[in-house]
Image (cartoon, grey):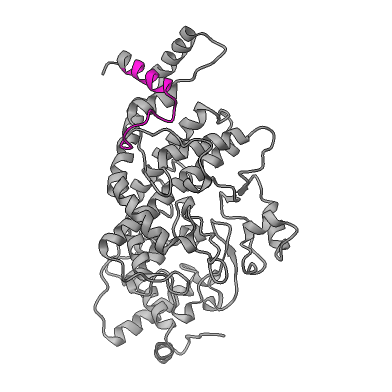
């Protein structure tokens, strides 16, 4: 298509509205739901507080049951955790944003309504979920066409043509291609999502909630909060994204899992939490429910990142209303799917565990003990007294975490050697756990794998007999109470 014909096609798309002309959901955004649609037929717009960074400082104590910290901020002063809430309230505008407080005309109710409508157009409803990757003509129109009612048609077309000439369509086309490929790889087709939505409502929604917020009524009675999918971050992944990878939206690719990571979590559950295993799901059902979880995560992160940008725009940003909001959502969706593609390209290389005699395993654990307590690893700075000392921290969701008590031998990401290796190698970005991959990269050729030594130490640490065997090997080993 020539540039002139493409320009006319884009203007035509814009004439029907920036959220699409209807029709198939494969490449064309459908019309948004009517404003009068019953609220139960759509995903509820996000209104809870948003932690855009791990909060500063450290919580003084655990939060009370049924009072997650960010919820307590909303309830001030009527919360049992007024001190935690006050601490977080001081971080508004920096680490925490509020999507329903409209200040200085920067974020307005009309923008919130527009955002909700565009999200409906791109991601459907709980009963009819979809992930729409718009056609390039729609992307081009949304990015360039702005109708100014104070100008005549000719002047608007002239301005649109000028903006069209400036647009970087090669980059847009590349981003769209990447997004389309990730939609296929992540199995986000409409049929899979429809099946997954039914399974999710049957098995998952009572804890993770209809939008994946992890805030359902039965989820906060005790123990850690169920995962909030909406920031696009997960803790127990086998991915390590290079620090040099572009961060296009939200948290970037940090915390993005492989599909296989989510399959493993749903199949096996998470030890030490209320997340059960689902061994009765067939492989096809498991595949479908994971597709729906990814759908909720992509939708939630697009909403999260667009809200954050609109509430706190950068110096050169426009006010995100009308067509600017439509374009913000399109850019953000492409960026979020791009981030999933970056994560998929960087699985953690877990070397095969050597077959060892019992003596060799304990010898490795002794080496791991020394590494654990060395300045090179410094694990005790967070896991004080092997995790028995309470040392509470904030995580990226604005909830409270405690570095694992390693003497218990209970690991939420799994106790197998490859599970622990991935946690140590790649860290746990959403909770601030350090990655130690460079300890392997810089190891001398032929030297023992330091991370496997630490893994064997952690496995031995949770076993009283193995602790005794380590002390028999080295009298200087101490496991202080």
Quarter of the image holding residue 348?
bottom left
Image coordinates of residue 99 in percent, x first then y, are 61, 44
Q: In the figure, 328 relative to 53: above or below? A: above
Magenta highlight range:
6-26
Camera-nearest residue between 249 and 348: 249
Quarter of the image holding residue 29?
top left
Camera-nearest residue between 413 and 275: 275
Identity of the residue drawn at 46% across and 67% down = 376
Image coordinates of residue 230 in percent, x first then y, are 48, 51
Identity of the residue drawn at 59% across and 31% down = 315
Is 199 included in the stretch rendered in magenta? no
Identity of the residue drawn at 38% across and 19% down = 12
Which quadrant holds the N terminus? Answer: top left
Residue 257 visible from this viewpoint: no
Q: Is residue 187 left or right of residue 36?
A: left
Q: In the figure, 151 relative to 454: above or below? A: above
Q: Residue reaching furthest right?
A: 77
Q: In the figure, 406 relative to 344: above or below? A: below
Image coordinates of residue 454 in percent, x first then y, are 40, 74
Image coordinates of residue 111 in percent, x first then y, are 57, 34
Camera-nearest residue between 172 and 242: 172
Identity of the residue drawn at 51% across and 59% down = 214
Is 20 included in the stretch rendered in magenta? yes
């Amino acid at each position: 298509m020539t540039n002139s014909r493409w320009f006319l096609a884009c203007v035509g798309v814009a004439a029907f509205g920036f959220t699409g002309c209807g029709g198939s959901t494969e490449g064309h955004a459908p019309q948004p739901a009517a404003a009068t649609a019953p609220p139960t037929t759509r995903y509820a717009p996000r209104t809870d507080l948003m932690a855009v960074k791990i909060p500063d400082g450290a919580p003084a104590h655990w939060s009370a049951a049924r009072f997650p910290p960010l919820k307590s901020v909303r309830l001030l002063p009527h919360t049992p955790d007024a001190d935690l809430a006050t601490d977080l309230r001081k971080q508004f505008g920096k680490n925490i944003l509020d999507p329903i407080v409209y200040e200085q005309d920067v974020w307005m109710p009309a923008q919130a309504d527009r955002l909700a409508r565009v999200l409906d157009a791109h991601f459907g409803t709980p009963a009819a979920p979809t992930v729409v990757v718009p056609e390039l003509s729609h992307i081009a129109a949304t990015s360039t066409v702005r109708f100014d009612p104070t100008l005549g048609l000719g002047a608007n077309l002239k301005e649109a043509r000028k903006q069209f000439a400036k647009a970087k369509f090669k980059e847009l086309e590349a981003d769209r291609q990447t997004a389309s490929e990730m939609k296929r790889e992540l199995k986000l087709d409409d049929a899979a999502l429809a099946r997954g939505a039914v399974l999710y409502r049957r098995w998952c929604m009572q804890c993770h909630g209809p939008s994946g917020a992890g805030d359902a009524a039965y989820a906060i009675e005790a123990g850690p909060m169920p995962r909030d999918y909406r920031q696009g971050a997960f803790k127990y992944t086998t991915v390590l994204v290079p620090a040099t990878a572009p961060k296009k939206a939200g948290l970037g690719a940090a915390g993005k899992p492989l599909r296989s990571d989510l399959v493993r979590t749903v199949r096996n559950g998470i030890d030490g939490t209320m997340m059960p295993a689902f061994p009765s799901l067939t492989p096809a059902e498991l595949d479908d429910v994971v597709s729906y979880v990814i759908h909720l995560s992509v939708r939630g992160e697009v909403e999260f990142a667009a809200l954050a940008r609109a509430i706190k725009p950068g110096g050169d940003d426009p006010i995100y209303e009308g067509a600017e909001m439509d374009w913000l959502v399109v850019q953000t969706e492409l960026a979020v799917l791009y981030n999933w593609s970056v994560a998929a390209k960087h699985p953690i290389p877990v070397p095969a565990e050597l077959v060892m005699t019992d003596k060799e395993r304990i010898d490795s654990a002794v080496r791991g003990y020394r590494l654990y307590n060395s300045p090179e690893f410094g694990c005790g700075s967070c896991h004080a007294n092997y995790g028995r000392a309470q040392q509470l921290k904030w995580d990226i969701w604005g909830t409270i975490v405690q570095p694992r008590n390693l003497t218990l031998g209970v690991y939420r990401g799994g106790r197998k050697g490859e599970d622990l290796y991935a946690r140590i190698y790649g860290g746990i970005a959403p909770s601030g756990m350090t990655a130690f991959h460079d300890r392997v990269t810089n190891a001398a050729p032929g030297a023992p794998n330091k991370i496997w030594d630490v893994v064997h130490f952690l496995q031995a640490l949770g076993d009283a007999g193995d602790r005794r065997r380590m002390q028999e090997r080295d009298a200087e080993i101490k496991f202080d109470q």
